[in-house]
Image (cartoon, rainbow, N blue to C red):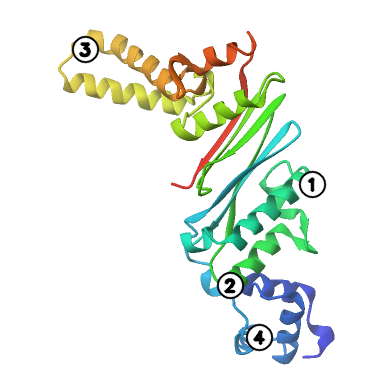
Amino acid sequence: MATAEISAKEVFKLRKQTGAGMMDCKKALIESDGDFDAAIDFLRKKGQKLANKRADREASEGYALAKVSGKKGFLLVLNCETDFVAKNEDFGKLVESLINVAIENDSKNLEDLLAASIDGVTVAEKVIEQTGVIGEKLDLSYYEVVEGETVYGYNHPGNQIATLIGLSEQVDDIYAKDCAMQAAAMAPVAINEEGVSQEIIEKEIEIAKELLRQEGKPEKMIDQIAQGKLKKFFKENTLLNQAFIKDNKKSIKQYLSEASKDLTVVSMKRFSMK
């Protein structure tokens, strides 16, 4: 097969499967007369670290990173296969470079970010390339953006948990920071009751009812008691209603009111690797 017959589509397909560079892929296809399997063998013989053998592995470890720019906060997660790679300094730098691209491009969602440019390729291509370089399957699995008048991003030591908080007013960063650390430590399911999904509410009510039946409570009392247990669930699992971890005599809502009467949390994102 002549050089002219090697299409860009074939080169990209080989690059996507192997993680090798574009020019290396093109040369491999030329040398193997366009035979795809032979091109892979050619790359392997040249010492290329290939990504194709890793496509079916589970990328269950990773690195979560939150970063703030102005009134926006960005949070992304890059998964890998082992904690050895997740804790590697170069892997951390890769995640840092990806979140910087997100900020520079003001990427609205994961699709936007994957299509953004980095080092002359797309972010999606960069992840594939690094899969081959690092030797583990990588997956940019999570990306979220929050906005607020005061925004804070908290990265728990070890980068296994990251949170973003957006507040309704411009106040001292300490209030957003405390909320972000609260979210990291206490894993609220929502900002307030209104943010809890109907699915979670129904599940909690059903669990409460079943436990009450096992305790032998009269059927006519079960609904009322279950509603009481739901209120307790909201108190323990919604950010504004949770007891403040630095002073459990007050709720987060009460804590925020110390800065401003109407100050509240308008956006929250939390990611935990485990």
Of marks 2 and 4, the one in the foreground: 2
> Label 3: which residue?
219
Considering the numbered disc 1 on the image, is that residue within a helix, a strand or a loop? helix
> Label 1: which residue?
105
Q: Earlier in the sequence, mark 3 or mark 2?
A: 2
Considering the numbered disc 2 on the image, is that residue within a helix, a strand or a loop? loop
Closer to the camera, 83 or 140? 83
> Label 2: which residue?
51
| Residue 110 horizontal/vertical position (percent) | 67, 47
Closer to the camera, 273 or 255? 255
- The residue under the point 59% across, 29% down is 177
Q: Earlier in the sequence, mark 1 or mark 4?
A: 4
Figure quadrant of the N terminus = bottom right
Q: Is residue 140 left or right of residue 236?
A: right
| Residue 243 horizontal/vertical position (percent) | 44, 19
Q: Amino acid at mark 1?
A: Asn
Q: Is residue 25 above or below residue 188?
A: below
| Residue density around tag 4, few if under 14, some if 14–19, many if 20 or more, within 10 Å | many
* Cα distance in 3D space between marks 2 and 4: 14 Å
| Residue density around tag 2, few if under 14, some if 14–19, many if 20 or more, within 10 Å | many
- The residue under the point 49% across, 24% down is 196
> Label 4: which residue?
39
Q: Is residue 11 above or below residue 90?
A: below
Is there any visible trace of residue 129 in the rendered image?
A: yes
Q: Amino acid at mark 2?
A: Ala
Q: Amino acid at mark 4?
A: Ala
Extreme residue toward the right, this view: 4
